[in-house]
Amino acid sequence: MQPYVLVVEDEDALATLLEYNFQKEGYEVGMAGDGEEALIMAAERTPDIILMDWMLPKLSGVEACRRLRRREETRNTPVIMLTARGDETDRITGLDYGADDYMVKPFSIPELFARTRALLRRASPSLLEDVIRQGDIEIDTKAFRVKCGDTQIHLGPTEFRLLDHFMRHPGRVFSREQLLDAVWGRDVYVEARTVDVHIGRLRKALKKNRTSDPIRTVRSAGYAFEIAA
Amino acid sequence: MQPYVLVVEDEDALATLLEYNFQKEGYEVGMAGDGEEALIMAAERTPDIILMDWMLPKLSGVEACRRLRRREETRNTPVIMLTARGDETDRITGLDYGADDYMVKPFSIPELFARTRALLRRASPSLLEDVIRQGDIEIDTKAFRVKCGDTQIHLGPTEFRLLDHFMRHPGRVFSREQLLDAVWGRDVYVEARTVDVHIGRLRKALKKNRTSDPIRTVRSAGYAFEIAA
DNA sequence: TACAACTGTCACATCATTGTAATATTACTG
DNA sequence: CAGTAATATTACAATGATGTGACAGTTGTA
């Protein structure tokens, strides 16, 4: 689905500019104003990529970066540093503080997009993919279409997101709670059993054009998506 | 048709920037990192235009350019040279090495677009055609005319721009907000639901001469344009 | 000024989607 | 094989999103 970018920037004008542009570009955007907040937000929901100011209140960008690297979930999350001209340029260019790329302010937004995409492509290619295929099932996230074999099938929004999530993580088992988080959203209060119903709806929709069921029920654990080999 | 542009640039940052911007502008983009690769890629698929760095590994831009000129397919392919300030400026201005235009880094992307279009217009005008066709629907963006089958139909300005935007991005789903941005303009304050009304008007106008509705409603996501296959 | 074309907004009808609870079915345990 | 826990299925009411007609304001033109 949409990549989730965490923007850590204390300067309001730039923060708003980045938020606006990344949203427009189709990213989900989280905003943090200082290093501590950044760590908290990154813990709540692992970002797909992080843009971090070099100079931050409370906890500098470099230090925040280091701490992110110590956590399992964010160990490999790409980080782009945003630096003002002159911020210890030597060390920055060395990229030896744990960031994956850096940009010197003022920078061009398109170039930032370009680098963001480059890093995302490396770290989680499936996020940038518009068309995902698993066996004979294919979804186009730009066109919101699902093909099973060579016939289109129709899914409701929730079923579509559910299938999208499954197809980006084939084989992996997700608990109902994980699915609620990933597909419904963090702050949505919905019964866990509701997942069953949507799984059922998705299965029904897919069943029309195929014999085998690509969704495996893992008793007392959750569900997984896999195309029989 | 999308023009196919071959970008030959070894500096990663610039290469990515160019790739990104040209894709965004609606070009198909091929990337090569040095002169040899450029020749191979140009042989595989003849580009409509080439952007070539002056200084390249293995085979300089000038030499690559000469060799392209020797091949039948690429003899008349326009080439824009990208030069760093100071790269033998005298000769470059002479354009006696076979390129059709040149730009000195750092250059502005919009200007590069402008020159690219200018060269394309000269070399293969049909690529910049003002007429867009999808199935039996055809619009002439210069003359502001719309044909459905072989009868003219009349659209208001907003509906025309809406259709124009849809036809340039067939299949893709746009949210109301994206449509407002693209069709109404970024800083126009208009209710999102207004899009619905114009979609309705566009549908009504198109319906007169065709049975199927080319605009697909994607619930909770937006609208997409597509001609049934 | 009167008129026509166009636009944006609202109100209301309609329909798809959703979450839940109730019920049926299945898989595991001993 | 019975008993139990977990999952599947169904039905349904509430919700939310979309389609549509009407209307008033605007603009440009005869």
Image (spheres, coloured by chain):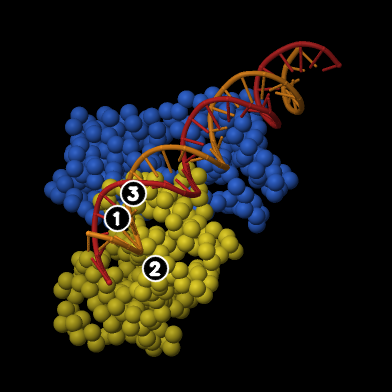
Chain colours: A blue, B yellow, C orange, D red
Q: Residues within 10 Å of mark 1 (few under 14, many from 20)?
A: few
Q: CA distance from mark 1 to mark 3?
A: 13 Å
Q: Chain of mark 2?
A: B
Callout 3: SS: helix
Residue type at tag 2: Tyr
> Which picture quadrant has residue B74?
bottom left
Q: Are marks 1 and 2 on the same chain?
A: yes
**Residue on which disc 2 sits:** B27
Where residue B55 sits, quadrant-wise, is bottom left
Q: Nearer the viewer, mark 1 or mark 2?
A: 1
Q: Position of residue A201 (x, y in %)?
A: 63, 37
Q: What's the distance in space between the residues labelled 1 and 2, CA to CA?
A: 22 Å
> Do residues under tags 1 and 2 come within 8 Å of each other at their CB atoms?
no
Q: Secondary structure at mark 2?
A: loop
Occupied quadrant, residue C25: top right
Residue drawn at x 50%, y 73% as measured from the top left: B151
Nearer the observer, B30 or A188: A188
**Amino acid at circle 3:** Lys
Mark 1 highlights which residue? B185
Observer-side mark, 3 or 2, equals 3
Residue on which the image places disc 3: A24
Q: Judge by depth and name the residue closer to the eye, D4 or D20.
A: D20
Q: Residues within 10 Å of mark 2 (few under 14, many from 20)?
A: some
**Same chain assignment for discs 3 and 2:** no
Instruction: Looking at the image, tell me whether mark 1 or mark 2 is earlier in sequence order.
Output: 2
User: Is residue A123 visible to the viewer in this orientation of the structure?
Assistant: no
> Which mark identifies residue A62?
none
